[in-house]
Image (cartoon, grey):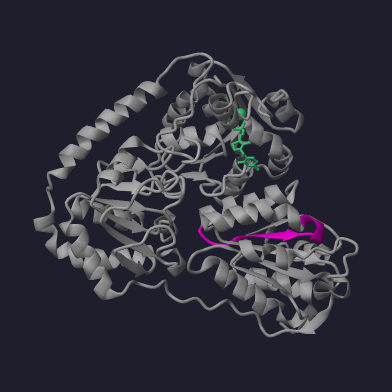
C-alpha cells in the first residue's frame, strides 16, 4: 500500500479484513470512501433508508455470519441515528464495525455545522470507540477494530473519522490482516472439578446461552447433555434451538416468556452448569429465580463472572473449548454414566407440556390467534429457515411457541428489545444467507418504524417474507395497561395503513390473511415469490401474551 488517500486505504483495509457488505448513507464526510468503494466494486454496497435500520441490518448479517462481515459507513449527521443498532449489538454480543465520518479535524468540537461527538457518544455502548487521529493510522486502526469486534466476546466497535483523514494522502504499509489468537480453553483443574460436580449432582440442569452459539458448539453441548443425561435449558432467545427443541433433553427456553418446564427444572435443580450465558433479567424472571447450591459458570468474558449470581466454580474460556475439555474427561466414563432414570421423568413432563402448547397453537379461532401463526411457520419452514421476531407480544409468542431446531434459526433482540428491529434484522440475515428462507415476524407498531426498508428490499431484491402481526395496537403495552390501570389506554392504539397496498406501492407483493387455514398457503406463496412479500395477518388482540413467569417484580 504505497501513497494513497485515507479513503482508498480504508477500502483496502476492509477488503483485507474480509468485509463482504458495506451498509452506507452518503454525505460529504463519507463520499470519498463511497467513491472508492464504487470504483473497485469488490464489496457489495447497500443503501438502507435510515442508519437505524442499516445498523440493524448489520446486526442480522453479522449474527448469521458469526463475524463482522457487514460494516456500517454513516455520514456524521447519521451517527446518532445508529445508536439503537449499536446498543442492541452491544447488549446481544453481536460483532459489528461502524465507521462514522465526522466534520473536518479543525471543526471537531467547535459546535458548528453537524459537529457530533461520535467517539464520546458511543464509548459506553461499544467495545472500543475511537477518533482516528492521523491518516496513516487508518489501516492498523481498522485491523484492531475487526480483531476486537469479532474476537473474544463479540461486540460493536465504532470508529469516528474526521473527513480530512479520508481525503488526505499518506504513505501506508502493505495491508495486513489482524492477528488472531485461538479461543482460550479453561483451567484444566477447574474443568475437572466442573465435571465432578455436574456428574455427581442429583438434579442438574445445563443452562446454555448465546456464547455456545457464538462458539458454534451446539453439537458438543448435545454430546455433554447426552453423556450425563442432563436436561438443557436455553437462555431467553440468543440460544433458542442450540439444542434442537425436539431433543428429549431439551427443555426449551427459560424465562418470563419461556417454557414452564424449563423454569420448573431450573428452580428444582441442585446444580446449574451455565455455559456462555449472562443470566439475563428476562431469562431469570427479573432475577426472582435463585441459583441452586452448586453453580458452575463458564464464560469467555471475566466480567460476566459474579455479575448477577455468585458461582461455586468459575471457568474463563470459550464455550466450545471448555466443552471439548469436559467431553475428553467424561467420555471414558460413558458406560457408567448412561441410561439414567432421569430421562423417563423428563419425557413424561415434557410430553404433558407439549400437549398443552399444542392445544393452544392448533386453535381455529377467528380472528387468528398469534399462537396459530407459530404452528404454521413451524409446519412450512425447513429447519434451517430463519425467523426474526420483534419487541412486544409478536416476538414473545415466537419465543414461546416457535419450535427451533438449530442455532441461529431464531433471531430476536433478546436483551435490548427496541421496537422496530425485526424487519431490518431479517433483511440483514437474508443478505447473509440468501439460500435460507427468512420469515420476519414484526409487530404493526414495529413496522411503523421501518416500513421504509421495503424500498431497500425491492431495490436490492431481498426476498424476505414479512408477517405483520396486525393487532391494531402496541399490544404488549395495551395488555399491560389494561391489567394495571383499569382499562385506561394511553398511546396504545394504532391507525395502520393498508400494509399490502403499501407493499405493492413499493414494488413488493403481499396479501391479507384473516383465516387460520390461509396462513400456510400464504407463507408458501411468500417464500416462492422471489421478492419481498408482506402478509398482513389480522390477529385477535385479546389473546394474552404467554407470560410464564415473573416479569417486573415491582409490578407483577
Ligand atoms: C424503541 C422502543 N420504544 C418503546 C418500547 C416499549 N414497547 C415494548 S413492546 C411495545 C409495543 C410494540 O408494538 P407492536 O410492534 O405492534 O408489537 P405488539 O406488542 O403489538 O405485538 C412497546 C411500545 C420499546 N421496547 N422500544
Ligand atoms: Mg401490535
Foreground pick, 230 / 305: 305
Q: Residue at x 42, y 46 (%)?
A: 283
Q: In the displayed structure, does residue 13 sit left or right of residue 166?
A: left
Q: x and y percent of residue 484 in the render?
A: 55, 28
Residue at 57% from the left image edge and 66% from the top image edge: 149
* Residue 202 drawn at (x, y percent): 16, 51
Q: Could you say which quadrant of the image residue 32 lies in?
A: bottom right
Q: Which quadrant of the view contains residue 530?
A: top right
Residue 95 shown left or right of residue 381 in the figure: right
Name the foreground residue: 167 vs 374: 374
Q: Is residue 394 above or below residue 273?
A: above
Give coordinates of residue 141: x percent, y percent.
66, 76
Question: Is residue 101 visible to us here?
Answer: yes
**Which is nearer the eye, 423 or 278?**
278
Question: Magenta segment range?
Answer: 66-78
Residue, far left? 336
Is 4 above or below relative to 55? below
Q: Position of residue 449 (x, y in %)?
A: 70, 39
Q: Is residue 469 left or right of residue 8?
A: left
Q: In the image, is residue 225 part of the stretch drawn in magenta? A: no
What residue is shown at x 13% (from left), y 52% (from top)?
Answer: 338
Q: Is residue 70 magenta?
A: yes
Amino acid at each position: 500500500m504505497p501513497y494513497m488517500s485515507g479513503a482508498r486505504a480504508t477500502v483496502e483495509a476492509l477488503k483485507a479484513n474480509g468485509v463482504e457488505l458495506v451498509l452506507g448513507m452518503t454525505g460529504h464526510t463519507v463520499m470519498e470512501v463511497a467513491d472508492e468503494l464504487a470504483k473497485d466494486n469488490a464489496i457489495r454496497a447497500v443503501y438502507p433508508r435510515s442508519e437505524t435500520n442499516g445498523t440493524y441490518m448489520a446486526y442480522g448479517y453479522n449474527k448469521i455470519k458469526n463475524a463482522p462481515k457487514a460494516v456500517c459507513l454513516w455520514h456524521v449527521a447519521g451517527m446518532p441515528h445508529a445508536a439503537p443498532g449499536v446498543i442492541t449489538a452491544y447488549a446481544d454480543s453481536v460483532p459489528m464495525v461502524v465507521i462514522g465520518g465526522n466534520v473536518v479535524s479543525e471543526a471537531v468540537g467547535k459546535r458548528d455545522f453537524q459537529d457530533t461527538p461520535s467517539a464520546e457518544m458511543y464509548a459506553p455502548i461499544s467495545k472500543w470507540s475511537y477518533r482516528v487521529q492521523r491518516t496513516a493510522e487508518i489501516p492498523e486502526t481498522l485491523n484492531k477494530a475487526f480483531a476486537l469486534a469479532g474476537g473474544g466476546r463479540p461486540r460493536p466497535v465504532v470508529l469516528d473519522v474526521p473527513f480530512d483523514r479520508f481525503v488526505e494522502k499518506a504513505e501506508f504499509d502493505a495491508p495486513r490482516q489482524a492477528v488472531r489468537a485461538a479461543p482460550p480453553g479453561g483451567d484444566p483443574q477447574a474443568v475437572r472439578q466442573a465435571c465432578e460436580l455436574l456428574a455427581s449432582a442429583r438434579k442438574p440442569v445445563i443452562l446454555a446461552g448465546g456464547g455456545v452459539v457464538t462458539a458454534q458448539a451446539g453439537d458438543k453441548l448435545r454430546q455433554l447433555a447426552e453423556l450425563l443425561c442432563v436436561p438443557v435449558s436455553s437462555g431467553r432467545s440468543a440460544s433458542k434451538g442450540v439444542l434442537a427443541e425436539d431433543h428429549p433433553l431439551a427443555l426449551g427456553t427459560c424465562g418470563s416468556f419461556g417454557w414452564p418446564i424449563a423454569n420448573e427444572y431450573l428452580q428444582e435443580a441442585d446444580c446449574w452448569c451455565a455455559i456462555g450465558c449472562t443470566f439475563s433479567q428476562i431469562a431469570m424472571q427479573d432475577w426472582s429465580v435463585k441459583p441452586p447450591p452448586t453453580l458452575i459458570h463458564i464464560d469467555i468474558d471475566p466480567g460476566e463472572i459474579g455479575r448477577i449470581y455468585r458461582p461455586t466454580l468459575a471457568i474463563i474460556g470459550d464455550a466450545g473449548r471448555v466443552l471439548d475439555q469436559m467431553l475428553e474427561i467424561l467420555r471414558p466414563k460413558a458406560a457408567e454414566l448412561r441410561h439414567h432414570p432421569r430421562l423417563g421423568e423428563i419425557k413424561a413432563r415434557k410430553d404433558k407440556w407439549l400437549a398443552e402448547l399444542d392445544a393452544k397453537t392448533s386453535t381455529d379461532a377467528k380472528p387468528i390467534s398469534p399462537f396459530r401463526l407459530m404452528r404454521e411457520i413451524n409446519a412450512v419452514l425447513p429447519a434451517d429457515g430463519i425467523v426474526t421476531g420483534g419487541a412486544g407480544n409478536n416476538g414473545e409468542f415466537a419465543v414461546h411457541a416457535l419450535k427451533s431446531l438449530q442455532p441461529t434459526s431464531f433471531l430476536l433482540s433478546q436483551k435490548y428489545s427496541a421496537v422496530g428491529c425485526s424487519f431490518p434484522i431479517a433483511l440483514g440475515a437474508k443478505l447473509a444467507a440468501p439460500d435460507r428462507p427468512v420469515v420476519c415476524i414484526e409487530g404493526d407498531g414495529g413496522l411503523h418504524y421501518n416500513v421504509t426498508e421495503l424500498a431497500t428490499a425491492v431495490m436490492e431484491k431481498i426476498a424476505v417474507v414479512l408477517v405483520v402481526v396486525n393487532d391494531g395496537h402496541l399490544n404488549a403495552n395495551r395488555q399491560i395497561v389494561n391489567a394495571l390501570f383499569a382499562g385506561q389506554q394511553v398511546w396504545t392504539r394504532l391507525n395502520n395503513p393498508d400494509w399490502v397496498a403499501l407493499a405493492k406501492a413499493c414494488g413488493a407483493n403481499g396479501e391479507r390473511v384473516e383465516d387460520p387455514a390461509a396462513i400456510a398457503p400464504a407463507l408458501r406463496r411468500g417464500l416462492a415469490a422471489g421478492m419481498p412479500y408482506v402478509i398482513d395477518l389480522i390477529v385477535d388482540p385479546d389473546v394474552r401474551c404467554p407470560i410464564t413467569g415473573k416479569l417486573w417484580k415491582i409490578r407483577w
